[in-house]
Image: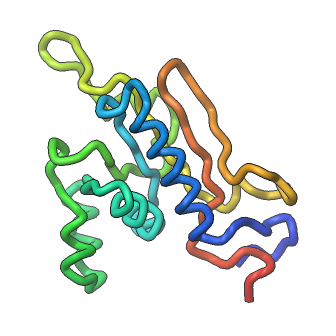
């Protein structure tokens, strides 16, 4: 898919492991259970990333009813479908539109309660895209990070398509 040598990025499994390790470290930190994780996704795409990470973390993945219905059409096994929930209260991992990987939009997933308190102290957005990795050959770190207060966006060079060097 990426017919340009600047789009030579890590394997999917390397990115999945890097995202898992980063999120595991954040969840074990001082804000731990008060951290909301948002995975950006198109209407379909990036499922392998968020499902594998959730499985490794032992968590469910919240998807809205529309996305759940779309994913139900993929004829997945019960063990994969059982990772998904349409109940936000069952997990702190949500799948959201990729275009919502912006700090102000990420905050809308944690509205204040009647006492004007937020459930989460930190929000981490995972922005998976191969386009973000162009020209970064030889880069030692797989992920890049941007912070705003206690919130963070992790840019992960993840694509469901082949990188330049893959057949």
Left or right: 127 as drawn, with respect to 5: left
The answer to whether residue 152 is above or below residue 91 is: above
Give the image's coloring scheme.
rainbow
Residue 29 is drawn in which quadrant? top left
Residue 42 is drawn in which quadrant? bottom left
Left or right: 136 as drawn, with respect to 64: right
The x and y percentages for residue 85 are 18, 58
The answer to whether residue 81 is above or below residue 54 is: below
> Which of 84 and 55 lies nearest the eye of the viewer?
55
Left or right: 39 as drawn, with respect to 129: left
Q: Residue at x 62, y 32 (%)?
A: 146
- The residue at the far top in this view is 115
Kindly tell me whether residue 63 is visible in this rendering. no
Q: Residue at x 27, y 74 (%)?
A: 80
Q: Quadrant of the C terminus?
A: bottom right
The x and y percentages for residue 12 are 59, 70
The x and y percentages for residue 79 are 22, 76
The answer to whether residue 83 is above or below residue 155 is: below
Left or right: 127 as drawn, with respect to 119: right
Q: Quadrant of the N terminus?
A: bottom right
Residue 113 is drawn in which quadrant? top left
- The residue at the far bottom in this view is 167
Q: Residue at x 46, y 27 (%)?
A: 104
């Amino acid at each position: 898919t990426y017919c340009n040598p600047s789009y030579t990025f890590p394997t999917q499994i390397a990115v999945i492991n890097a995202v898992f390790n980063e999120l595991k470290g954040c969840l074990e930190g001082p804000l731990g259970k008060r951290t909301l994780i948002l995975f950006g996704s198109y209407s379909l795409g990036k499922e392998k990333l968020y499902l594998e990470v959730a499985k490794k973390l032992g968590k469910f993945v919240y998807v809205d009813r529309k996305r759940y219905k779309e994913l139900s059409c993929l004829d997945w096994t019960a063990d994969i479908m059982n990772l998904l929930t349409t109940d936000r209260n069952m997990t702190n991992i949500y799948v959201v539109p990729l275009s919502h990987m912006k700090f102000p939009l990420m905050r809308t997933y944690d509205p204040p309660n009647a006492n004007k308190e937020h459930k989460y102290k930190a929000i981490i957005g995972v922005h998976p895209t191969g386009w973000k990795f162009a020209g970064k050959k030889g880069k030692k770190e797989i992920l890049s990070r941007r912070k705003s207060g206690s919130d963070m966006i992790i840019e992960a060079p993840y694509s469901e398509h082949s990188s330049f060097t893959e057949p």
